[in-house]
Amino acid sequence: MPAYHSTFPVDPQTDRMVGNIVLLPLNTKFRGPAYPANSDYDIIDECLDLFRANSFFKNFEIKSPADRLLIYGILFINECLSHLRSTTNYNEAVKISTNVALDNFVLPGSSGFPLNTVYTVPLEDHNAMELLRTYIQQFRQELAMRLLDRLYRDSKERPSKFWLAFTRRKFMNKSL
Amino acid sequence: MSYMNNPAVVMDNGTGLTKLGFAGNDSPSWVFPTAIATAQPSNAKQTSSNAVSAGASSVANTGQSSGSGRQYFGNSTSATAFNSLSSGSALMSNNLAGKRGTEDLDFYIGNEALIAAQGPSYGLSYPIRHGQVENWDHMERFWENSIFKYLRTEPEDHCFLLTEPPLNPPENREQVAEIFFESFNCAGLYIAVQAVLALAASWTSSKVIDRSLTGTVIDSGDGVTHVIPVAEGYVIGSAIKNIPIAGRDITLFIQQLLRERGEEDTSLRTAERIKQEYCYVCPDIVKEFNKFDRDSEKFAQFVVESQEKTRRKVVDVGCERFMAPEIFFNPEIASSDFLTPLPTIVDHTIQACPIDVRKGLYNNIVLSGGSTMFKDFGRRLQRDLKSIVNNRIVQSEYLSGTKSTGVDVQVISHRKQRNAVWFGGSLLAQTAEFKSYCHTKKDYEEIGPEIVRNFSLFNMV
């Protein structure tokens, strides 16, 4: 049984795509271009569910455009965790994660992104790139907040060490 | 013929552990490491570059010069230092014991060897490597102590059942026969292949209907995992596959996870205890992670006490409970050079066998060895293998347009799994026929060591 794949079906005809990245609907209060999701379970929940299991794997075969979003989500979770320490309390963690989420980030597909072999985006199409940038930013903010919910479920004082242990694991041997 | 009434001795010498006991018993009387600690000067001579033993080797040299007049000592296989130091050695030079030095008697085996090796005067060695005997001199002494010090029996009153790994060269069998008949003068000897004994051990399971010696044995110990197909008592040597993942890799993986989490105690010993006490196989890792999130009962705590019981360290046990055995099913998570899951290897092994025995091999997959003891290991293997087989059947039905009769995949777990090989030996050696299958001392003297190249198979009904 290899690494886990996204279960969200993608139809390139009807779903919004930028290059080969799909902009799946999200359940979020953060402002951005994402459509609200039909169900309670969205791609962000899936990223959080699969993060720990998939972090053990070094190989990942992309089966659908949703997998590309999944990869980005998992790498971003790892990025967030690496900014936290075992003593960081919830309020500090909110600040840190918000900064990480809003920080200048490299869009997948553009130069400097570590996994450009799997992402292709229309770099010259300014509107599409702007849409992708705002979507990814919204995605990052929501993912960071929901990650903290899980990290501080048991105690607001310190993050779960069982999550923090995954800081050093690198999914597909890559990090953002 | 006093040996006819005595129970046979069953000895299973593995790379890691030796299992000793008498036929008919439920479990071995002794289980200890296959290790021998010998007096250091013999080692110092072999590795004279060793700085620590420099002093000892100089003693060895003087010993040799003073003992040079005695030809017997010059011929001995190990260093003679101890002879010259012991005052009585000159007197012994004309009896048989004097042929070898008294340092020949100065050794320990098993757990005693591990303790002795902590001191400066003994060197530890493991005479069995990869299942096969590497150092015959050490092995002979190991057996000697096993028989006289642990089992406390007279070899001439007992038959012996020994085990060998698959693909053991017949020369090794002859060597064993020479030692057992000539050094120990044993009454009778039978050498059985470990995989066949493991199959016999599975007869205790209620799932086994017919007592056949056809099946696939998955033997996982500390160092390596073998998948061995056996058809009617004969090992199909060409199809055997080895997997470089076994107990030690699981322990190391647990240690790595503990270190990543920054636990207080991350020693190999702790990791090993956690492996033995808490690990199990889960059907699906993601679901299992979620179960841990919902239910904190799943987490365990392992307490390490220092030797003086003054300090206690608490180690939390989390996802390694199910992630560690997962490396059999997803080797990718722990190693980068070996990526094929165990169920796929088992499937490849059986596919490499003659077509007329394949059904029997799928039908009777038997587990053996400590690393197969994880809860639900057999169930997961059966599920994964079944899906591989069913996919192939669907494929071939589609391509050929005919209906398959189906292949029944059955993995058998039983309570005797840990010492399955020994238990199988105990089971076979307690039968009335066993002694007639043994080669006796008389046969050996008549024909010679090559007699042990062939043993007739047990045909149990």
Image (spheres, coloured by chain):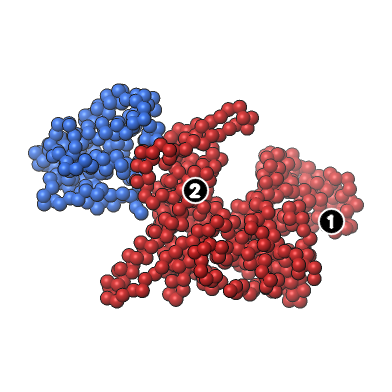
Chain colours: A blue, B red
Query: Which is more toward the observer, A170 or B299?
Result: B299
Task: Tell me residue B16's x, y (percent).
Answer: 60, 52
Q: Is residue B102 left or right of residue A129?
A: right
Task: Tell me residue B126's x, y (percent).
Answer: 64, 51
Chain of the residue where label 1 is placed in the rendered structure: B
Where residue B436 is drawn, which disc sits there? none
Query: Which is more toward the observer, A42 or A6?
Result: A42
User: Residue at image x 89%, y 57%?
Assistant: B94
Chain of the residue where label 2 is placed in the rendered structure: B
For badge 2, the amino acid type reads Asp
For badge 1, the amino acid type reads Ala
Look at mark 1 in the image and give the residue it sits on. Answer: B97
Crowding at mark 1 (Cα within 10 Å: few <14, some 14-19, many 20+): few
Task: Tell me residue B222's x, y (percent).
Answer: 55, 51
Figure check: B147 above or below A97? below
Look at mark 2 in the image and give the residue it sits on. Answer: B249
Task: Tell me residue B358's x, y (percent).
Answer: 44, 71
User: Residue at image x 54%, y 42%?
Assistant: B273
The disc, 1 or 2, on the residue closer to the chain's N-terminal end is: 1
Query: Which is more toward the observer, A11 or B460?
Result: B460
Q: Residue furthest right?
A: B91
Figure check: B283 above or below B359? above
> Would residue B13 be seen by someone viewing this image from the given angle?
no
Q: Residue furthest front?
A: B206
Figure check: B184 above or below A19? below
Residue A128: name its quadrant. Answer: top left
User: Residue at image x 52%, y 50%?
Assistant: B247
User: Residue at image x 34%, y 74%?
Assistant: B404
